[in-house]
Amino acid sequence: MAELKTRLQNDLTAAIKGRETVKVGALRMALSAITNEEVAGKVARELSDDDVLKVLTREVKKRKEAAEAFAGAGRAEQAELEKTEGTILEDYLPAQLGDDELVALVDAAVAEVAEQLGEQPGQRQMGQVMKAVNAKVAGRAEGGRVAGAVKAKLAG
């Protein structure tokens, strides 16, 4: 079993014993999403820590979007609950990259692709650059942020 999933289950047990209802709810939803991912498809499989991180990242993103939707609808209490759950789940994700670190990774990826192509990549090679950057970022930055940094670099 993935270490991260085990850690989530152990923290869930501790939260239940400590009567932390918000944390219990957030961890149960995350573990449910992980289980759903494990049984999705034709054959059940065991998720690796990287796969569990992807599921957790997706769940954090859902919480942020739900919080924005609730806040926009005037339901501040529900929005606050979603933000709190998102914060709880963020604790299990690796530290996010700062802007300087992200720009450095994008620069390195552009240099790699330029070396492969023999010329400076442009907007048409954005997919190749994104592939190289995402391999280095490995969940430590949101996809939209990465894409924005790559676009800015390729645009000049």
Image (tube, rainbow, N blue to C red):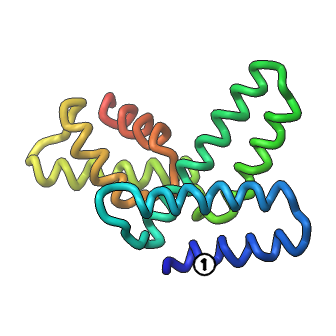
Q: Mark 1 points at which residue?
A: 6
The residue drawn where x is 45% and y is 48% is 103
- For badge 1, the amino acid type reads Thr
User: In front here: 117 or 70?
Assistant: 70
- Rendered image quadrant of residue 78: top right
Q: Whole-percent x and y of residue 28?
A: 69, 60
Q: Whole-percent x and y of residue 108?
A: 32, 55
- Rendered image quadrant of residue 10: bottom right
* Secondary structure type for disc 1: helix
Q: Whole-percent x and y of residue 81?
A: 82, 43
Rendered position, 145 above or below 109: above
Q: Whole-percent x and y of residue 41?
A: 33, 55
Q: Give the side of residue 22 with respect to residue 58, left or right.
A: right
User: In front here: 59 or 124?
Assistant: 59
Rendered position, 141 above or below 11: above
Q: Residues within 10 Å of mark 1 (few under 14, many from 20)?
A: few
The residue drawn where x is 55% and y is 53% is 57
User: In front here: 26 or 106?
Assistant: 26
The residue drawn where x is 19% and y is 50% is 113
Residue lying farthest front? 42
Residue lying farthest top? 73
Residue lying farthest right? 19
- Rendered image quadrant of residue 153: top left
Location of the C terminus by quadrant is top left
